[in-house]
Image (cartoon, rainbow, N blue to C red):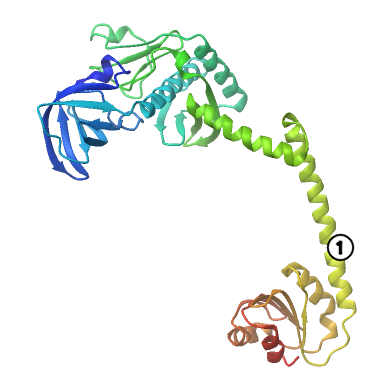
Amino acid sequence: MTEKLYYIDAYIKEFTAAVLCSEPCDGGFDTVLDKTAFFPNEGGQSADTGKIKDATVLDVYEEGGVVHHITDRAVSGDMVHCKVDFAPRFDKMQCHTAEHILCGIIHRLYGLENVGFHIGEDEVTFDISAPLTREELDRVELLANRAVFDNLKVDTYFPTSDELPTLEYRSKLELTENVRIVKIGDVDSCACCAPHVAYTGEIGLIKILEIMKHRGGMRIWMVAGERALRDYRKKYENIKEISASLSVPQHDTADALKKYMSDTELAKREIKSLRKSLAEARAEAVAKTEGNAVFFFEGFSIEELRYFVNAAADKVSGMLVALGGEAGEYKYVITSNSVNLSAEIKRINEALSGRGGGKPNAVQGSFMAELAKIREYFGC
């Protein structure tokens, strides 16, 4: 069995180990050492990366007590120098310890269980057994950060088989042996195999981001440590730009944006009404026409084209064709009181590289043809 140095000291960055084997496998070489500080992919936390001699560690997994390192090349030699990529390791230590604090407080206040956990490259999620309100989670978040400010000691230990039944701790599984307990002051006690920070003050900040109901419970997105700083910086830059665009102080942007959206919606309704009036005015100017008629309106939407043809339909005995858009791709709305457009539209589309359809008295779609060709087809 591999001696797991990450159980002894989560802060070990470099170590020397004996190479037991390094053999070809899927994805590289399966390298086994007599001891390791590389944490395997386990417990919702991805594996550490780094170097074993001159080989890059791509993945790490444990099987039957043996830790396997997948390296990009074979590792030769009896004793080799190893180095863990500690920055991503410490990031995961911050996030994982933060998750323990949050879940411990949720369990203590509301009796809910942690039923899932994952540290990704860009996000950290954990699942709880029942939903909580945002107000309840705000309380949890405040208490979690107070635990960080208190700089509590994070203890890890393996209780004896006699001690284990006497302990109160959280666990997703029923465990009976080789149980490692992570205890964070009076905030949490949980069975866990992963490395954690030594003191909660090293986490820096815990922030709950998004929440959603998930499989009868709730999924929660969170950040901690440097991730929280990066998240704040990104949101600060966004709010700074919004503040400048709206010409209001940053803390007033929400109210200013609501007013802007309300004013914009009112302006849209007014523009829509004016565009409808414009389309209907254009329709009033249409003279009585025998046969077909084609009209082009620059900037008209499909909806505005419909306003036009509905108002002018009785003035054209054949097909009334209203076009919008631009050369090479015209939107069309066609209406007729004398032609079954459902029967004609296939032929029309084939002739004018079009697509669309509709009812016997009205169709709509688009033509990939020049305006002159469209007019020629309809005899206008």
Let me know if residue 195 appears in the view.
yes
Q: Quadrant of residue 81?
A: top left
Q: Is residue 167 above or below residue 4?
A: above
Amino acid identity at mark 1? Leu
Looking at this view, is 188 or 233 the one in front?
A: 233
- Residue at the disc numbered 1: 274
Q: How many marks?
A: 1
340 relative position to 99: left or right:
right
Question: x and y percent of residue 239 in the render?
Answer: 67, 35
Looking at this view, is 318 or 328 the one in front?
A: 328
Q: Is residue 55 above or below residue 98?
A: below
Residue plotted at (35% across, 30% down): 45
313 relative position to 369: left or right:
right
Residue plotted at (72% across, 31% down): 250
Question: x and y percent of residue 365 in the render?
Answer: 65, 75
Q: Is residue 235 above or below residue 307?
A: above
Question: x and y percent of residue 321 in the render?
Answer: 74, 82
Crowding at dot 1, Cα within 10 Å, few <14 / some 14-19 / many 20+, comes out as few
275 relative position to 241: left or right:
right
